[in-house]
Amino acid sequence: MKILKYALFALAGLVILLGAVLAYVAATFDPNDYKPRIVQLVKDKQGRTLRLDGDIKLSFWPNLGADLGRASLSEFRSEQEFASVERARVSLAVLPLLRREAVVDAVTVRGLRANLVRYKDGRMNIDDLVATDDKKGEAVRFDIAGVVLEDAAVMFRDEQKGARYALTKLDFRTGRVAPGVASPVELSFHLQATEPKMTIRQQLKGRLGFDPLRQVVSFEELTMETRGDAAGYTNLHFKAAGDLRAALKTGEYTASKLNATASGASGKDNLELKIEAPRLSFAADKASGEKVSVTAKLSGPQWAASAVMNLAGVEGTAQAFKSGAMTLDLDMKQGTQSLKAKLASPLSGNIPARQLSLPALHASVSASGPDLPGKSVGAELKGSASVDLARQGVQAQVAGKVADSNVKARIGVAGFAAPSIQFDVDIDQLDVDRYYPPRTAAAGPAGGAGGAKAPEQPFDLTALRNLRAAGTLRIGSLKAANVKASNVRLEIKAAGGRLDVNPMSAALYQGTLSGAAAVHAAPATPTFTVRQTLSGVSVGPLLRDLADNDTLEGRGNVNVNVTAQGNTVAALKKALNGNAAVKLTDGAVKGINVAQSIRDAKARLGTLRGEQAQQADKAQRTDFSELTASFDIKNGVARNTDLSMKSPLLRVGGAGDINLGEDTINYLVKASIVGTTRGQGGRERDDLAGLTVPVRVAGALGSPSYTLDFGAMVTDVVKQRVEETVRSRLEERLLGGAAAKPGAKEATKEPPKGDPVRDVLRGLFGR
């Protein structure tokens, strides 16, 4: 007992002595006297300038602590400020230090400001502060009652990416921080970034635990909430909750009771996202998980879409995983149109490479709407697909049936924010017209007599303005705008708001088509360009199918090179510029029989005067063996001056305008009779051979009227016969006077007096 008594007395004396020493030190020691030495030490060791503007206050019992006022640290070997604090305090329990345990009572930092920089060569402006020390010593155990970081701000400038990040209003609080203790943690901050552009407010709560010896970190009852603008979305709201655990030493990662929701707006479009995962576990040699569900909803003023993805079960390793069944259900609606699709396939993935694979993809698609053929269209496709998230790429190969078409396609997508699409598509047959309302006969103005036509809707080319695509489309049999073609091949490229189809080729109407077409959709008023050559084409069936026009027949070549600007078909027709040429053989112009009209004119010339007009009659036709013409097109008006039409009976020339914008024609045809009308139904020799008959073609382009100018024809005939008669009389007189011989009285007689014009008319009319 005496030994214990003496030991207690000795311990009490030691404590009293230690307290006296500490009291003396506290009363006589002023740490501010050492400021210059501290500043110089930092300068010598770190090459930075430390400024201590506030007083340093020390406490010795029961905690060893330091309270630091305003302080700042410069950049390496520079006077420029790197970081500063308004106030910092750290206190440690004294006795645990004797056991090589650091028990920190509290760490409090207020008003921290720091500027981080990553230079273009990859160096950081804190490399000298975080350099590792290769010397290993015995680990010191620590226990912190709490950490408080208030009103901190960290600026980061990344010169490699040309980006800036600002972390402001940063608050961080913890409970007790010690190995094996789940400490409550609260974190909040504001973040502004230029790359990617975002402005968000972040809050995080939970219980953080760690075990340094086992290298285990856990986050229990985690809740995280984000609000702001990011990734092109405004009013973004993201919430996540669950439990996370990471065993860094063994490479085991576990997430349980994980669920997350997100919502936001992009312009007038809204997004809702939900993820649920009851349990996911990844280890070095194994990965497993229960059902994972992802639901997404997107909506706009006139459309809505939803997608639900389910993974039945996941197994694998931390490097790779697979799921026996993945399903994706899509549902889209826009106005009266709707689309439903279901995709199913096994799923596998490589986590480090961030790659996904769908090796046995099956897709079922159905679309419905009042304007679709049979009010619905379906598709069944099979194939495979792969996704590379690291490179932002998608590859897919599919084959199957879409409506009545058999399709094979290879598709690649590069880049998710601004995707670039590569494709190669084969379609055995495609009837485009079946997906559009049927054409109807031209009707009168809407609303009855005196009503106004409904305004034409402008083209919607917004999808082309950001489209980046290139590839080949092959179609065995195609019908579009009622035009039939086969062996269609299109090389398509879209970029910068411009769509080019070059080259394009097809077989159609006993001939071939080759050329190119382009649409420039980026300007407010889009531009269309067409350059086509039709070789050996039968134009009659083509015109009937394309424009419901039955005025021309024949086979030959047509060249078109035109450009137009406009937002509607009517505007394009009025703004058409370029040129065109046609060369046909063995055809006919329908609506008029020039030979029959001339024969009828001969029978009526004695009683008719001036012009005689007649409406086009499809039963009438003027045959030709060759027809050529070229057109100069300006502002929707096609001007022709070199029409040449030949047949055994006729030679036809002409000049005039075709107003494509107004669908009218004003054209003067001059037909010269060079043979007999027997080939056109005549029953006698044509005594009008050599005449030129003017025919005025005018009116609506689809049904023009033909006017034969009989007065001009008579004037031409009279002029021609008078000239011939006068010439003949003059020749007779001249020759008669010069060659007169004795006894040849008849040769020297004067010609009988009379009216040569009257004689001509009598000969003309057979009177």
Image: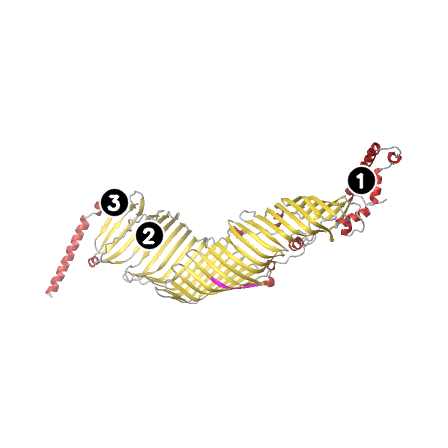
Q: Disc 1 vs disc 3: which is toward the camera?
A: 1
Q: Which residue is mark 1?
A: 721
Do the residues under discs 1 and 3 have CB atoms within 8 angstroms?
A: no
In primary-sequence order, the first of circles 1 and 3 is 3
Q: Which residue is mark 2?
A: 150
Counting other residues with Cα less than 10 Å from the Cα at mark 2, is it few (<14), some (14-19), or many (20 or more)? some
Residue at 39 percent of width and 63 percent of height:
320
Residue 740 lies in magenta, yes or no?
no
Residue placed furthest toward the left: 2
Is the stretch drawn in magenta largely helix, strand or loop? strand
Query: Which percent across, then down, holds residue 592?
Result: 74, 50
Counting other residues with Cα less than 10 Å from the Cα at mark 3, is it few (<14), some (14-19), or many (20 or more)? some
Tell me the CA gap for discs 1 and 2.
115 Å
> For this view, does 88 lie left or right of residue 735?
left
> For this view, does 514 lie left or right of residue 549?
left
Disc sitting over residue 350 in the figure: none
Question: Please, what secondary structure does the residue beneath circle 1 have?
Answer: helix
In primary-sequence order, the first of circles 3 and 2 is 3
Of residues 408 and 195, the one drawn nearer to the viewer in this rendering? 408
Q: Image height check: is 191 above or below 386?
A: above
Q: Which residue is mark 3?
A: 43
Instruction: Please report the bounds of the magenta region as a residue range.
Output: 377-384
Q: Amino acid under label 2?
A: Glu
